[in-house]
Every structure is written in C-alpha cells, then in structure tokens.
Image (cartoon, rainbow, N blue to C red):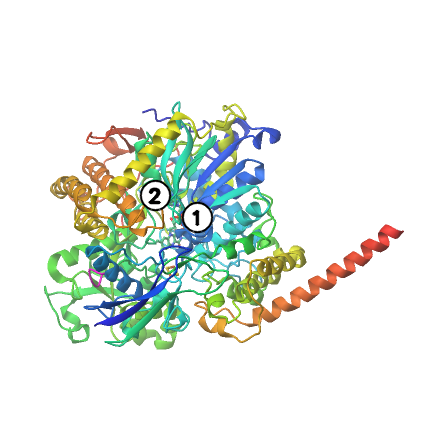
Amino acid sequence: MKVNLRVWRQRGPDSPGEFKNYEAADLNPNMSFLEMLDVVNDRLASRGEEPIAFAHDCREGICGTCCLNINGKPHGPGRAIATCQTYMRSFRDGDTITIEPFRAKPFPILKDLVVDRSAFDRIMQSGGYVSVRTGAAPDGNSIPISKEIADRAMDAAQCIGCGACVAACKNASAMLFVSAKVSQLSLLPQGRPERHRRVLSMVAKMDEEGFGNCTVTGSCAAVCPKEVSLDFITRMNRDYLAALMHEAVGRAAGKEGGAG
Amino acid sequence: MKLEAKTPPGPLAEKWKRHQGSIKLVSPNNKRRYEVIVVGTGLAGASAAASLSELGYRVKAFCFHDSARRAHSIAAQGGINAAKNYQNDGDSVYRLFHDTIKGGDFRAREANVHRLAEVSVRIIDQCVAQGVPFAREYGGLLANRSFGGAQVSRTFYARGQTGQQLLLGAYSALCKQVGSGAVQLFPNTEMLDLVLIDGQAKGIITRNINTGAVERHAADAVILATGGYGNVFNLSTYARGSNATAIWRAYRRGAGFANPCFTQIHPTCIPVRGDYQSKLTLMSESLRNDGRCWVPKKQADHRPPGQIPEDERDYYLERMYPAYGNLAPRDIASRAAKRVCDEGRGVGTSGLGVYLDFSDSINRLGLKTIKERYANLFDIYHEITGEDAYQAPMRIFPAVHYTMGGLWVDYNLMSNVPGLFVLGEANFSDHGANRLGASALMQGLADGYFVIPYTIGDYLASVKPGTTPKTDAAAFTTAEKETQERVQRLLSIRGKRNVSYFHKQLGKILWDGCGMARNQAGLEKALQAIPELRAEFWKDVNVLGESLSMNQSLEVAHRVADFLELGEVMCMDALTRTESCGCHFREESQEAGECKRDDERFAHAAVWEFKGDGQKPERHTESLNYEFTTLATRSYK
Ligand SMILES: Cc1cc2nc3c(=O)[nH]c(=O)nc-3n(C[C@H](O)[C@H](O)[C@H](O)COP(=O)(O)OP(=O)(O)OC[C@H]3O[C@@H](n4cnc5c(N)ncnc54)[C@H](O)[C@@H]3O)c2cc1C
Ligand code: FES
C-alpha cells in the first residue's frame, strides 16, 4: 500500500517547525505504524536526508514512550491502544496521514516528533509514593486488602504515563494522570497515612508545571491507551477537598495550641 | 584476571547471614561522604539507587530513557517468584533454590542462588508496602499462580503487568529520594564509557541524548544495572532501546564477561512477518496449557490449516515428549519447533512458524471458557497479525528473550574491577544456562533492595571517605576524548549503508550460527562473517546528522558497533563450550536429541577478558562446586 505523510519537522527546541510531505510507497498493511516510520526513515537516510526523530521503546503498549498525534488524535485512530499498537491496516491505500508530536505547553518539543514529558516525573517526585524505607516493611499478608479495592487500585495503576490525556485536553490538564496515581495510593491502606499531604503537593506541583484546569470534558479518558476512568478525577477532587479541610482544621488546632 | 568468588564459608543456609555479620561497614556519618553512580533505572537500578540513598550515600542515577519509569523491566508480564509458601504447598527457600539451580542446568553458583531464594520473601513485603497492587484473593490475601519449572505455586502477579507495577514501585521509591534531593537523576543520558583510576572504577562518560553533550561523572563506586543484551540478535522480545553498550564498554576496560553465549529463546512468540519487522512479541507460555503444537507431516504443505486432515498433522511435542507434551520446558519446546521447521515443515509464508491450535480445547471446553482464560492474548494476537485465533490456529515461533550471560561478579556483586558492581540482567550470577520464568524480576529486586546495600560497604570501607576523584583527572580526559573521537568517526564515514542494515545482518548471522542449536561449522562460519561485517560497518555505515543535538541514528550506531564486537565473543564462547547445557545446545553433544552436559570439563563459568582490538580475548574459568546439590540430568520424556 501507499500513503502520503504530512510530518512535523523541527530541528530543535528553539527552531521553528513545519510540515513536510513524504510519500510512503510499497508498504505492507501488517506493518505497525512505527515500522512504517522505520521504513520511511531508512529511505530518507539512504538519500541523505536526516531521519524523522520519534520516541519509542517497548513497541507493545506498556512503556509509555511513543507519543504521536495521528490525524489530530493522540495515539491515532484505535481505541485503548498506544501509537506503537497501531497498524497500517487501520488506514486506506492512498490516505494522507498527518503526524504531529503531542501538543501541550508543559510538553515542549525537543525535535521533530519528540517532546519533553519530564514534568510528569517532577509531579511524581513531589509526592507520588508511599514513604517506606527498604527493609522496614511488614509481612505482605499482614494487611489484608479486599479484592475489590485491590482491583480498583490496579485499574488506576495501569497508567503508562504517556501523556496522551494532556495532549487531548484543550486545557492541557494533567488531571487524569495525577488522579490515577493519587487514587491508587489513597485506595490502598498502605498509602492512606500520607494521603492528604500527597494530594496537596501533587496538585500544587501540577499547577506549577503549567498544566491547565480540568473542565471534565472527558477527551483525556477517550484517548487513554489503558482506559483509565474519569471517576478517578472525581475521586481525587474529593480527596483534595478532604485534605484542604484537614489542613485547615490542623492549622486552627495549631493556633489554639499556640495561644494556650 | 583474578576471579575470586569470595563465597563465604559455612553451611549453605548460614552463608548470607554470616557474611552480613562479618563484612565491613561504613558508619552512618561517613556514608554521605561517598558518591555512588548507578547506571540504569530498571528494577535492579531503581531499587539500588533508592535503597543506597536511604542509607545516606550520595547517589547519581542515569538512564537513557526519557523517564526512569520506562526501563525495559516495565514489559514483564507473568510474575515474580518468592518462597513465601502462602499456599502451604510445600514451598521453601531450599525448594526455590533447588528449582533455580536445576532449571539453570547446574551452571550457576550455589551460594548466590540460595541468597536469592532467601531474600525473595522480603521483596514481596517491600513491594506491598510501596503500594504495588498485587492480585488478591477474596479473603484479602495475596494470590499466587504456578509457572514453568516448578511444582509449587509461588508466583505473585499484578494482572498481566507485573513488571510495570514492580517498576513503578521502585520508581516511586526513587522519586521519593529525588524529591528530597538525596538522588540526582540523569534521564536521557547514555553511558558511553567507564573510567578507571589506578585500576578502580571511578566514573563514567556520558552523552546527553537530547543535546548531544558529552560529560564526565566521578564517584567512589559505579554500579551497572543496564539490563540484558538480547538485542544483539536484532529481533527479540526486548524493548528496541535495550543494548549492551554499558557492560561492553566496561568489558573493554577490563571487566570479565561471563558465559556470553547463554541466551534464552522463548518458545511462544509471534513469528517474523517481514523484513520491515522491528520487534517480536511474546505470547504467554500459559497458552500451551490448552493449545496443541503441530506442523504438517509433509514438507512445504501450503494448504490452509483447516484443510490438512488430522492424520497428516504432526503433533510433534506430544510425539517427542509424551510425558510433558505441549508443556515441555522453554528450551526443549523451542528446539523442537526449530527442528520441524528445519525439516521444511514450518508454516506461514516464511516457513518459520508452527501452529498452536486451540480447536480441540474449544470443542472440549467451549469457546466461552477459552475466552475467559486467554481473551487478552487472543486480542494481542489479533491486533498484531489481523488474524482470529478462535477460527484458525495461531502461528508461533521461538524468539530471543533473555540473556543469562553478563559481566562476571563475585558474591558481593562486584566485578573483577574493584569498585564496579553489576546488578540485574546485566550480570551473570544466578540463572546458570537457563532462567526459570518469573525469576528475573526476583533477581533484579533482590540485587537492588537487599544485596547491594550491604555488600557495597565492604568495598567502600576500604576507600578513604572524601577522596572522590575530580573529573579533570587524566583518566577522565582520555576517556572523554576517546568517546568524542568515536562520535566523530561514526559521523564522518557517511557510507552507503544504514545502521539498520548491519544490525539485521548481524542478527541473521547470530540466529543461524549461535541461536537455538549450535555446531562447530556454523560457529566457525559466524566467526568469519562477523569481523567482515564489522569491517564493512566502519567503512560504509551511513550516520547522518550532528553530534551536538538529538541524533537517534547516532545512538543506534553506537549500540550496533558494540553488538558487532559482542556477537563475536558470544560465538567464541559457544564454540569453546563443546558440551550442551540449558539453552546452549551443541549438536555434537546430545543424547537422543537432548542436551548432554560434560560436568568433568565444563562445570564452570567461562569468563572472557578483553585483550585489545584485533586480539583474541582470553578465556578464564571460575569452577562451580556443587556442595549442597547433586548434579543430575534433566529429562522430560
Ligand atoms: C516481554 C518480556 C516479558 C518478561 N516477563 C518476565 C516475567 O514475567 N517475569 C520475570 O521474572 N522476568 C520477565 N522478563 C525478564 C525481565 O523483565 C528482565 O530480565 C528484567 O526486567 C531486567 O531488569 P534490569 O533492571 O536488569 O534491566 P532493565 O529493566 O532492562 O533496565 C535497564 C536500565 O538501564 C538503562 N541503560 C541501559 N544501558 C544504558 C547506558 N549505556 N547508559 C545509561 N543507561 C542505560 C536503561 O535506561 C534502563 O533504565 C521478561 C522479559 C521480556 C522481554
Ligand atoms: S513504545 Fe512503549 S508504549 Fe509504545
């Protein structure tokens, strides 16, 4: 098969970018989308043109590295899959396909189709963990956790950190990503002692990194390769309010204590 | 080369405890005066970096990924073993130890494997405390499943994403330490050389993948946790970026490389479909519980499977291994598939595939049951091949999956280069000639959480605190210059062939000569072809772009250049080991088609020492003594 590609090319973070057209002929419909790009890149290199930079690693939908916006949709036409799980048979012979990087202010473009998603790591560093030292853990079975709760926490934990939710959101909000982590840990008894502190600092960090507000449009969940549910956003909003209350009460108690 | 295993004396079950009680310690106040470099943030690296910094060491952690969370460990599906005996089915530390030693076909060090089994139980505790959502039973307790090579149920899992959940646990521990300033994290940073001062590992040279900047980093000790080298074959179940550069550069600086030819080939993967293919996908081995493997009896029988009558099919595993049938172990099942394809009876356009047929099970158990058990796997298969395996049999073929070989380490996980430690899949320590399922995750986390935090002290106690070298030391200048020259050399060739061409060629040579079955003639042929290909690479490779910017072709060129050297040593290793053991099947050494070990001559780890470019590396051995187990032959007939 043959397709026409419109690809975003940008030399570096500070260079202007533009769409370039490439004809990709002699493709096999069983190629993955990224294999198609490999073939295009090989042909570009053979005629002395620098290959298109794109991010990828596992190529099986679990590492969260691949991040292409295909025909205006993060991760392309399929439902509940990542870019690397998209196959050429999802397109028609002769189609024109537009390929862009994930677009969002907190994800600056580094080169061509590669963006910088380190803001996600910084949010995690601000509180996305349970503070337990290596070696200090009690026996794994000493805290029974109901299957329902464990399964629910697992639903949230599936997030692969790809950033499609941010790229799909008109406000570039990171609420789906942050709420998945916050919910996973606040659902589980191990994460409860720190739940107030965690949600407050992760949300503060998210705002500081320049992610926008959530208006619950749902475009994030619609493109999520792991189908992380919008319910977690509702849950996190509750956790957040509870944490604010807790903090306010704590402050008041602290003041009283000081006066006494 | 001095290979002192430093295995502690005493009864097997006492060794680790005694060792912990007798090795040197670094006092709490002094710990923060030591700087430790950890390269790799997979299970082994992330757990090590977090744990060491909790102890007070100043840690710098590096990975080439854009985030520490994306290491290849993320892709592990099946589970992690631990001798918890929560099922009351007779599991014990000793049993896990014994299964691992036997599974490795008696080519691993007893003391290391026993320690692995001992600490396995604490790994689960640690991960649960971090919030890893392991599968649970209705009563709220942890669930287990069984896995190949074991008669007990000791595998813990988190849906089909155990690796992801364990890695996110270790990554969160790392995030905690980075957030508090105790760990300095360098993502997008690839180690391109190891720096030695007075024979001790004191730093690394790196290249920033986003900017191209080459940098120097000094420390009091260097830990490599950089994963396996299976991508030397080009096509494998590994993530595309997995590579050997860190351990290969260390080898070139004097670290011994042990058993390079021990590579695991997994029997149930989706076969290669075209030469555009970049990656092979694993289909869980559990499918063999209800699927039957077969090929046509006739050669080159191109009829669709449904039109091949029952009596013209060869259910070869059931025929060759009546006792185990379709559940024969990984190495055995892989070799059998190869054999029937070599006979010209393989299926699919390439002829490199066998059928995994569920029709009998569907008839017996009903479509609903099969869907309940395997729907997600059938979905993956459909997504990749576009075929419906409920209608026609799946086509599968073995693929490269794991490397048991790696840098040689002693009981403290230190290589023969003082101050250089190696953890996880990058070392050779625990799996001998064949790894059992669900044991790699266990080993990575054992090394990082529970071994290195103790054993690194034994080395650092001998290093004067506060003497971390400066990066302007001569050794750093030389190493950086060499790296810069290599970058320039790669960029200046501007030849006719892309890097991918060389990687594919190397993969073919190794797959044919040093794959599932090896023989003298094949290995000698590969040993001729690889140096020729390498020479062609350095004459005719085409790497475009610049050094001081993101340059993905350059990244891959570095890795392939190293693979082109490593592949040769793998073949030398396979050629010298004239016995068969585990994954290493020398056709000359077999008994009725099965591995024939030669314990008299080969009960050892073979350790290769770099002697300079163009020189043959020197083979050393560490002999393996079996004090607590008896060497036995594995049989599955
Ligand atoms: C598809 C698949 C499924 C698997 N399933 C299971 C399973 O169910 N159970 C099981 O026990 N095992 C399984 N395994 C094996 C297991 O996943 C790996 O052996 C293990 O995760 C390796 O962990 P690691 O920490 O040693 O290395 P990796 O996870 O490979 O991490 C390597 C790290 O090193 C970094 N790195 C590498 N080179 C450099 C360099 N030069 N400079 C800087 N950084 C570098 C990388 O960025 C990365 O952070 C599976 C493997 C595959 C391929
Ligand atoms: S490359 Fe890993 S999720 Fe796509």
In this rendering, is residue A191 above or below B460?
A: below
Q: Pointer 2 indicates a residue of which chain?
A: B
User: Pointer 2: residues within 10 angstroms few (<14), some, or many (20+)?
Assistant: many
| Type of amino acid at the residue the image marks with label 2 | Lys
Under circle 1, the secondary element is loop
Which amino acid type is shown beneath numbered disc 1?
Gly
Residue B102 — which label? 2
Residue matched to label 1: B42
Give the percent coordinates (x, y) of residue B378. Answer: 33, 69
| Helix, strand or loop status at disc 2 | helix
In the foreground, B590 or B331: B331
Q: Quadrant of the N terminus of chain B?
A: top left
* Chain part drawn in magenta: B272-276
Q: CA distance from mark 1 to mark 2?
A: 27 Å
Q: Examine the image and state in which quarter residue A253 appears.
A: bottom right
The disc, 1 or 2, on the residue closer to the chain's N-terminal end is 1
Image-based side of B545 in relation to B145, left or right: left
Would residue B614 be found to the left or right of residue A220 on screen? left
